[in-house]
Amino acid sequence: MTEPTIDIRVWRGTDQGHFESHRIPARENQTVLDAVTEVQRSHAPDLAYRFACRVGVCGSCAMTVNGRPRWTCRTHVKRVADAGVITVEPLRNLPRIRDLVCDMSDFFEKWGRVGTFEGTESRDARPARIDASSRERRAADAAVQCINCAVCYAACDVVSWDPSYLGPAALNRAWTLANDARAANAKTVRREALGAGGCGSCHSHGACMAACPVGLSPTRSIAGLKRQSLLDLLGGG
Ligand code: FES
């Protein structure tokens, strides 16, 4: 009996390149990352791709699979194969380094640009008591589980049109800082988020929200930032 197989087409090259087709065994519970690994081990040892944890935590394995950005270690081939074919490319909206690997520098630079946590306490102070049921804490908690995979960034059409846009992940990060009762710089974060390339550029298409593998809603975070920033302006903040 012949073993079932799948066709996997992987991008080779940088901006200039081509798809390379490989036929590999179809396995039970095979993920797209498993399939890419099989190609590298059995067919193309010089294929460049990125992963670390394989269990949906580190965010490093994101690629474009049959036209959609996805975390490949938690995406089952059976769920996304189109007539037995999967096509794997690097993420959109980021420079390509080689094969399936993108340069994440812009993404992380924007993440850092929205601000870092600056606390109100001295290093000797006891940990602050945070009311877990407060509106602010619940808002921050709803957005805090980002794994920095850049799937939302690749899904965002505004980033495609305007590379200066901070993008959904950085603005979602800003929202968690702006709602952290321990943060001394929440207003500065909101001001940065409202500046050039900030939350005012979001068209609320919701593509980031639809693509986020861990179910976050950067769209909601960005709407919250717009609202808070407007209140800051009205309040003379
Ligand atoms: Fe870590 Fe996929 S390899 S999230």
Image: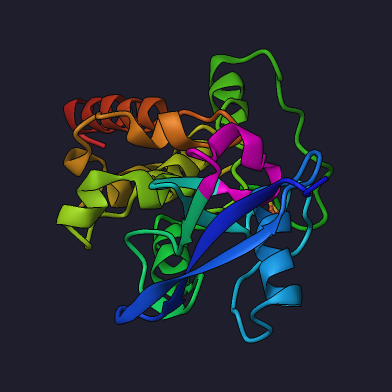
Q: Please report the residue visible at 64 percent of the width from the left and 36 percent of the height from the top.
A: 78
Q: Is residue 73 left or right of residue 127?
A: left
Q: Is any atom of residue 93 visible in this view?
A: yes
Q: Position of residue 165 (x, y in %)?
A: 24, 55
Q: Is residue 22 above or below residue 140?
A: below
Q: Is residue 191 left or right of residue 185?
A: left
Q: Nearer the viewer, residue 7 or 74?
A: 7
Q: How is the image coloured?
A: rainbow
What count of labels does the image hold? 0
- Quadrant of ligand 1 in image: bottom right
Q: Please report the residue visible at 67 percent of the width from the left and 13 percent of the height from the top.
A: 133
Q: Is residue 78 left or right of residue 55?
A: left
Q: Please report the residue visible at 70 percent of the width from the left and 50 percent of the height from the top.
A: 73
Q: Please report the residue visible at 83 percent of the width from the left and 55 percent of the height from the top.
A: 124
Q: Which quarter of the figure has residue 229? A: top left
First to last magenta residue range: 71-85
Q: Is any atom of residue 118 visible in this view?
A: no
Q: Which quarter of the figure has residue 231? A: top left
Q: Which quarter of the figure has residue 181? A: top right
Q: Position of residue 169 (x, y in %)?
A: 45, 47
Q: Is residue 99 above or below residue 146?
A: below
Q: Position of residue 45 (x, y in %)?
A: 69, 84
Q: Is residue 204 left or right of residue 53?
A: left
150 drawn magenta: no
**Quarter that holds the C terminus:** top left
Q: Nearer the viewer, residue 235 or 75?
A: 75
Q: Nearer the viewer, residue 11 or 223?
A: 11
Q: Nearer the viewer, residue 4 or 38?
A: 4
Q: Position of residue 100 (x, y in %)?
A: 51, 70
**Quarter that holds the N terminus:** top right
